[in-house]
Each structure stands twice: as C-alpha cells, then as structure tokens.
Image (cartoon, rainbow, N blue to C red):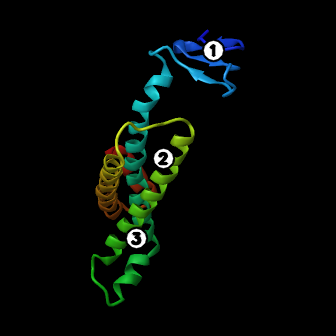
C-alpha cells in the first residue's frame, strides 16, 4: 500500500490498485504502478478524440445518401441557390455536430481525470486540428454518400474506407 493510505487495497491486472480509504480524507481511487492503464489513459485520450472525429465520416455519408434516396436533393435543385450549397450546408452541419461531440467528450474526459499539460492556446489549436480533420472527413463521407445508392451502403462504405 502507498504511504498515507488507511484502508485496504485490491490489486487488479496490469498493476492497478483500487484504494478504498485515504488518510487525508480525499476518498478512494485508482492508483497505478507506472505500467498500468491509469498512466496510459492520457495517451489513449488523444486516440479516442481522433477516432470519434474520423468515425463521423460514416454518418455524413449516410445522411447525404438518405437525402438523395428520399429525393430531398432533387427538391433543393428546383430552388434558386448555388449547386454546392446543399453539400456545403450538410458538411458545415456535420462540423457543428462534431464540435458538440468533442465538447461533450472533453467534458466527460475531464470528469474522469483526463488532464492536459499544455497551455490553453495549444489545447485550442489541437481541437482546431481535430475539427479540420473532421471537416475533411465529412467531405469524404459526402463523396461516398453521393456515390452509392442506399444509406446502408454509404455507412459501410465510410467504415470500409477508414
């Protein structure tokens, strides 16, 4: 047991230990030995953010394929607007959804103990790069959605592409 721990501890796989009571009254929590999942959670957090953004490709492609399948795009073509306005609007809406997803994901990660070791500008730049990646991938999803006949094929096409 670590110094300052009053209660019992329970060892788990990977060298992680659940400590039940602390002498300073801060409650219980997971403690690692430098090799376990607690220490690698910070590295995994970055991957989870990137994975969440890239998997939005399948949803973007499926949404556009669904709009094409239902005839929504044909109805928009009868309106006096630019040809690319529907796709641009759809990808910008996907970007807004990705931004909201990242905010929720970052909030939950902070509640679970994820911390950054950089200044605020670098953190914003990192999230900006994630949003740029998500916007680029939504255009790839739009291309897939326009290339297939059904929303189901667009979903699998987006996942296969990844």
Disc 3 marks which residue? 68
Residue 116 placement (x, y as % from top left): 41, 38
- The residue positioned 48% from the left and 53% from the top of the image is 103
> Which residue ends up furthest to the top in the rendered image?
1
In terms of sequence position, does the residue under pointer 2 or pointer 1 come before the other? Answer: 1
Q: How many numbered discs? A: 3
90 up-or-down from 11: above or below: below
For label 2, the crowd category at 10 Å Cα-Cα, with few meaning under 14, some 14 to 19 and many 20 or more, is some
Residue 26 placement (x, y as % from top left): 66, 28
Disc 2 marks which residue? 106
Query: Front-most of 153 and 84?
Result: 84
Task: Give the alpha-carbon distance from disc 2 to disc 3, as whole Å.
Answer: 34 Å
In terms of sequence position, does the residue under pointer 3 or pointer 1 come before the other? Answer: 1
Task: Give the alpha-carbon distance from disc 3 to disc 1, as whole Å.
Answer: 63 Å
Residue 40 placement (x, y as % from top left): 43, 25
- The residue positioned 63% from the left and 14% from the top of the image is 4
Indicate which label's residue lies in the foreground, 3 or 1. 1
Q: Are marks 3 and 1 in contact (CB under 8 Å)?
A: no
For label 1, the crowd category at 10 Å Cα-Cα, with few meaning under 14, some 14 to 19 and many 20 or more, is few
- The residue positioned 43% from the left and 58% from the top of the image is 99
In terms of sequence position, does the residue under pointer 2 or pointer 3 come before the other? Answer: 3
Disc 1 marks which residue? 4
Q: What secondary structure is found at the residue carrying circle 2?
A: helix
Q: What secondary structure is found at the residue carrying circle 1?
A: loop
In the image, is 153 to the left or to the right of 128? right
Residue 18 placement (x, y as % from top left): 63, 19
In the image, is 52 to the left or to the right of 27? left
Indicate which label's residue lies in the foreground, 2 or 1. 1
Query: Front-most of 71 and 106?
Result: 106
121 up-or-down from 72: above or below: above
Query: Front-most of 73 and 38?
Result: 38
């Amino acid at each position: 047991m670590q110094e300052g721990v009053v209660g019992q501890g329970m060892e788990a796989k990977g060298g992680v230990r659940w400590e039940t009571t602390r002498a300073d009254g801060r409650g219980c929590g997971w403690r690692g030995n430098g090799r376990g999942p607690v220490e690698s959670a910070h590295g995994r957090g970055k991957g989870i953010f990137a994975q969440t953004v890239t998997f939005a490709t399948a949803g973007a492609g499926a949404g556009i394929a669904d709009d094409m399948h239902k005839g929504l795009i044909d109805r928009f073509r009868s309106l006096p607007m630019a040809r690319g306005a529907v796709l641009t609007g759809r990808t910008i809406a996907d970007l807004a959804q990705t931004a909201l997803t990242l905010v929720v994901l970052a909030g939950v990660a902070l509640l679970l103990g994820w911390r950054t070791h950089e200044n605020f500008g670098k953190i914003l730049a990192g999230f900006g790069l994630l949003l740029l990646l998500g916007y680029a991938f939504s255009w790839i999803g739009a291309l897939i959605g326009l290339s297939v006949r059904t929303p189901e094929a667009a979903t699998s096409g987006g996942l296969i592409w990844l």
